[in-house]
Amino acid sequence: MDNIKRVLLKLSGEILMGDQEFGIDQSQLKRFSDEIKGLIKKGYELSIVIGGGNIFRGLSGTEKGYDRVKGDQMGMLATVINGMALANSLKNAEIPCRLFTAIKIEPFTEFYTKEKALDALEKGFVNIFTAGTGNPYFTTDSAAALRALETNSDLLLKGTRVDGVFSADPEKDKSARKYDKIGYDQVLNENLKVMDMTAFAMCRDNELPIVVFNINKEGNLLKILDNINMGTLVYSK
């Protein structure tokens, strides 16, 4: 883990809500922007895949009568809104960034290609990837794994509400044990929840390490790459 240079951060839409019940908390955006700026100053190259659950979640939309495909497409648009808000916040913090989308929605964002994303990283821009993979039935976790591999990232950071990977849900089971490090196979054997199985399989098959950590704690994003044990490293043993 000493040679980490290029990182992809999976940021859920819910994280942007802060203490609100929905929408975007501007103070959360500013905090993330400040911490991202700190990572860039340390020399890391950063891409971000952002979710849309603070606005609309496609899968839950089916429970309200939405067609699954249309619901997922609405969820993709929600991620674009979040990406635009984050890009604006980064620019206010004087952090150069490029906003990409997996669907054609110019002039709001730039249509994603691997070549443009790699060029942006090499020029010192933070990439923000929105609209998931551009396809229904795939989560933004899958988009994060895909974009991390396409951009030759050294590590996938997954920010959550808990401190890492546990033997059980720590919000429900106080005796749950936190893992500092764990292999892909053990995650599968113990049926632990790291990310959706499509995303996890992509990381495992390509030996892309994952670090799961609590992004709700202020300063954690800035500290996690200096102290991986603050979270859980999932890797090929």
Image (cartoon, helix red, strand yellow):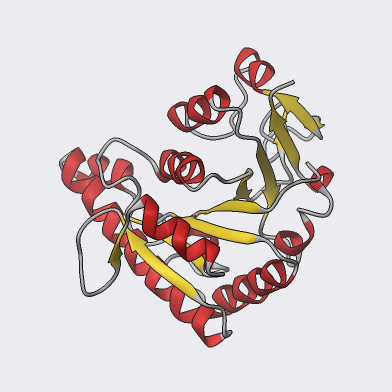
For this orientation, the residue located farthest to the top is 189
Q: Position of residue 169 (x, y in %)?
A: 66, 33
- Quarter of the rendering containing residue 51: bottom left
Q: Is residue 168 above or below residue 15?
A: above
What is the quadrant of the N terminus in the image? Answer: top right
Left or right of 64, for residue 85: right
Confirm whether residue 136 shows in the render. yes
Confirm whether residue 86 shows in the render. no
Residue drawn at (79%, 60%), measured in percent from left and top?
223
Q: Position of residue 25 (x, y in %)?
A: 51, 75
Residue drawn at (70%, 35%), measured in percent from left and top?
165
Left or right of 13, for residue 135: left
Q: Position of residue 105 (x, y in %)?
A: 20, 65
What is the quadrant of the C terminus in the image? Answer: top right
Q: Position of residue 11 (x, y in %)?
A: 53, 55
Left or right of 32, for residue 131: left
Residue drawn at (20%, 39%), measured in percent from left and top?
68
Left or right of 41, for residue 188: left
Residue 222 vs residue 69, the one in the foreground? 222
- Quarter of the rendering containing residue 221: bottom right
